[in-house]
């Protein structure tokens, strides 16, 4: 299973490199199902792996001047706050078991169910090829109104992705395109900056709260994702963006469906 997990981690880096988003949504299932890590611990590892991998890709985009740091900071600061709130309040204080009527629902089910729903939404949008093809509005919103919306969006995305340990690029990119009028490639680069900062902030919060990380294991996974990123950079010159999104969408749909069925069967 370890070798299979390493190969899957390589695939995660490849997808993130090719699409600029989406690869991180594979991280939690890889850690839980292939490395047999508990769901809560897996969200912490996921934040580290997503942050480092996105950071590597971010510097590639930065060198090509495809990052808007001003927009990234406006979106990123509230996003960091959202992630830290999720890691310090929501995840630790969520009861291990919730009782609803006569049903007992474990914390792990809530996290995985939320994550699988995000996967299904992401898959649907990629298969339909709508979200990443959004056009910037012709009339820009008033600067203050636009910034308020960006801040609120960042806070919500930060809390949501901090709860499940995902990067959230599939939520961030459309928001950047619609709310700021950024070019698609710049939106991807800016998204990678935001994902890097908020994911590493969330992981740092977990470490300060006493999370014990296996650094050697993390190094293996990070190296595997880097290999995937490098392969993705090569393949990106040959494969069309639309085809890649659609295939990844179907794969995400299958994995998300499997997770929700598995959680329901084992509830």
Image (cartoon, rainbow, N blue to C red):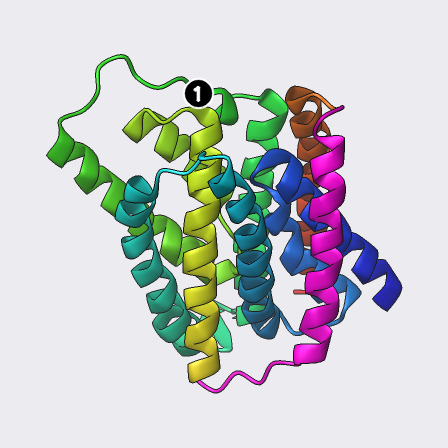
* Farthest top residue in view: 138
In the rendered image, the quadrant that contains the C terminus is: bottom right
Q: Is residue 180 above or below residue 117?
A: above
In the rendered image, the quadrant that contains the N terminus is: bottom right
- Corner quadrant of residue 153: top left
Q: Residue at x 38, y 69 (%)?
A: 90
Q: Residue at x 30, y 62 (%)?
A: 81
Query: Is residue 172 visible in the rendered structure shown here?
Result: yes
10 Å crowding of disc 1: few (<14), some (14-19), many (20+): some
Q: Is residue 4 above or below residue 108?
A: above
Residue 81 among those drawn in magenta: no
Q: Which residue is mark 1?
A: 134
Q: Position of residue 75 (x, y in %)?
A: 30, 46
Q: Position of residue 23 (x, y in %)?
A: 63, 46
Helix, strand or loop: magenta stretch = helix
Q: Secondary structure at mark 1?
A: loop
Residue 215 among those drawn in magenta: yes
Q: Is residue 151 above or below residue 122?
A: below
Q: Position of residue 263 (x, y in %)?
A: 67, 59
* Farthest front residue in view: 63
The part of the chain drawn in magenta is 209-238
Q: Nearer the viewer, residue 121 or 231?
A: 231
Q: Position of residue 96 (x, y in %)?
A: 51, 78
- Corner quadrant of residue 79: bottom left
């Amino acid at each position: 299973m370890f070798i299979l997990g390493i190969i899957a981690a390589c695939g995660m880096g490849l997808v993130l490199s090719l699409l600029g988003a989406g690869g991180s949504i594979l991280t939690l299932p890889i850690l839980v199902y292939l490395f047999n890590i508990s769901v809560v611990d897996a969200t912490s590892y996921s934040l580290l792996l997503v942050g480092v991998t996105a950071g590597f890709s971010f510097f590639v985009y930065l060198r090509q001047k495809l990052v808007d740091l001003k927009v990234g900071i406006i979106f990123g600061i509230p996003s960091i706050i959202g992630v830290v709130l999720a890691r310090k309040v929501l995840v630790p204080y969520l009861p291990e078991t919730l009782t609803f009527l006569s049903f007992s629902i474990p914390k792990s089910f809530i996290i995985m169910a939320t994550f699988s729903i995000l996967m299904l939404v992401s898959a649907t949008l990629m298969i339909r090829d709508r979200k990443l093809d959004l056009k910037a509005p012709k009339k820009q919103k008033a600067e203050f109104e636009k910034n308020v919306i960006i801040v609120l969006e960042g806070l919500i995305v930060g809390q949501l992705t901090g709860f499940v340990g995902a990067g959230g690029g599939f939520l961030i990119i459309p928001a950047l395109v619609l709310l700021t009028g950024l070019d698609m490639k710049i939106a991807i680069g800016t998204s990678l900056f935001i994902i890097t900062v908020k994911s590493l902030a969330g992981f740092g919060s977990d470490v300060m709260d006493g999370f014990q990380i296996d650094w050697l294991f993390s190094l293996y996974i990070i190296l595997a994702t880097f290999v995937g990123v490098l392969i993705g950079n090569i393949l990106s010159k040959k494969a069309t963006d639309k085809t890649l999104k659609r295939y990844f969408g179907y794969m995400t749909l299958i994995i998300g469906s499997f997770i929700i069925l598995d959680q329901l069967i084992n509830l």
